[in-house]
Image (tube, rainbow, N blue to C red):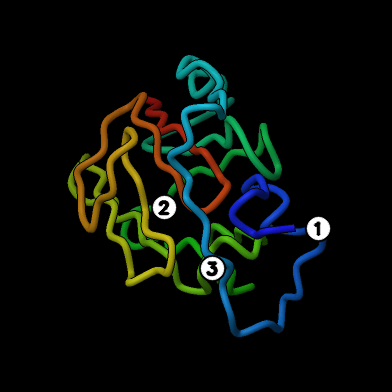
Amino acid sequence: MDPRDETPDERAGGAVDKQSDSTLTYDPVDESRRVRAREAAAGIPGLEGFGLVVTDGPHEGTHWMLSPGRNEAGRNVEAVLFLDDITVSRHHAAFLCEAGRLWLEDLGSTNGTYVNGKRADRAELSPGDEVIIGRFHLVVARGA
């Protein structure tokens, strides 16, 4: 089978070798993929500050409360947002919470980081924004 004929999920394969040094190339902006409604982010119990909800992809429904300062996301087991999938780089992106604002910075990842469907190296995020990291579709939430 020609790899170009495979779906992104087929290219990503099943189990991820956590010790692998390579990252699978993956195009996350595929119009055929359905992303859940942005309202899903409103359901993080006890959220103070910013949070993220996985609305599509591996571990759908998982959520994180972001701490003030830097919150790294990646396939590195020490990342605050450990995203265990071969489409995610070890040090993929960082979420920076400063003075009531949230910023996203791509850390030179293989597949890039997308905000609302557009590739972004750095962007300020607002509640309801969609961030795509590999096969993970995350929605930004904000609590009290």
Mark drawn on residue 14: 1
Specify whether 125 is left or right of 55.
left
Q: For residue 97, which numbered disc appears in the image? A: none
63 relative to 66, above or below: above
Q: Residue 43: percent from the left, percent from the top? A: 56, 20
Give, as a three-letter code, the residue at label 2.
Answer: Ser
41 relative to 85, above or below: above
Q: Which residue is mark 2?
A: 67
The residue sitting at 60% across, 85% down in the picture is 21
Pick whichever, 11 or 104, lies toward us.
Answer: 11
Sooner in the amino-acid sequence: mark 2 or mark 1 = 1
Q: Position of residue 139 (x, y in %)?
A: 45, 32
* Quadrant into which the N terminus falls: bottom right
User: Which residue is drawn at the image coordinates 35% and 46% (left, top)?
Assistant: 114
Residue 106 sits above or below residue 98 on the image = below
Q: Amino acid at mark 1?
A: Gly
Q: Nearer the viewer, mark 2 or mark 1?
A: 1
Q: As shown in the figure, which amino acid type bears the numbered disc 3?
A: Ala
> Which callout, 3 or 2, points at the residue further toward the start of the chain?
2
Q: What label sits on residue 79 in the rendered view?
A: 3
Q: Residue at x 47, y 50 (%)?
A: 27
Q: CA distance from mark 3 to mark 2?
A: 13 Å
The spot of residue 140 in percent (x, y) is 40, 33
Q: Nearer the viewer, residue 67 or 123?
A: 123
What secondary structure is found at the residue carrying circle 3? loop
